[in-house]
Amino acid sequence: MFLFLDTYWKLGNRESEELANLLSSLSLLPDGVSADPALMDDWKKCVSDMITFEEKSGDKPWELRLQK
């Protein structure tokens, strides 16, 4: 999502202060920590609400599925 929004911003929407603030909050610091840990928690919850992790056996030990 960050890459998509960053590209969108760079391609001509640089006037959007709200988008610039969101990108700033979503960015990772040089040590890999989120610039806004609370927003990162919101992002992780959103992802976990959309993806199901299933452990498997055999040659595919796990699988991620989008929830419908």
Image (cartoon, rainbow, N blue to C red):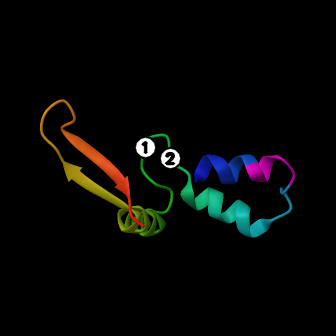
* Span shown in magenta: 8-12
Amino acid on which disc 2 is placed: Leu
Q: Point out the residue furthest to the top here.
A: 59
Where is residue 65? Give x, y as percent: 35, 53
Instruction: Report if the CB atoms under discs 2 and 1 are less than 8 Å apart.
Output: yes
- For the point 26% across and 54% down, which residue is it? 53
Residue at the spot of label 1: 32
Q: Residues within 10 Å of mark 1 (few under 14, many from 20)?
A: few
Residue tagged 2? 29
At label 2, counting other C-alpha atoms closer than 10 Å, the crowd grade (few under 14, some 14-19, many 20 or more) is few
Locate residue 64, reporting x and y percent. 32, 49
Residue 33: percent from left, percent from top: 42, 50
Q: Position of residue 48 (x, y in %)?
A: 35, 63
Q: Is residue 35 above or below residue 18?
A: above
Say which amino acid is labelled 1: Gly
Could you tell me which secondary element the residue under label 2 belongs to?
A: loop
State the SS at label 1: loop
The stretch drawn in magenta includes residue 4: no
The kind of secondary structure the magenta stretch mainly shows is helix
Residue nearer the viewer, 64 or 26 = 64
Q: CA distance from mark 2 to mark 1?
A: 5 Å
Residue ID at (41%, 64%):
50
Q: Is residue 21 left or right of residue 27?
A: right
Q: Give the residue drawn at x 22%, y 43%.
A: 62
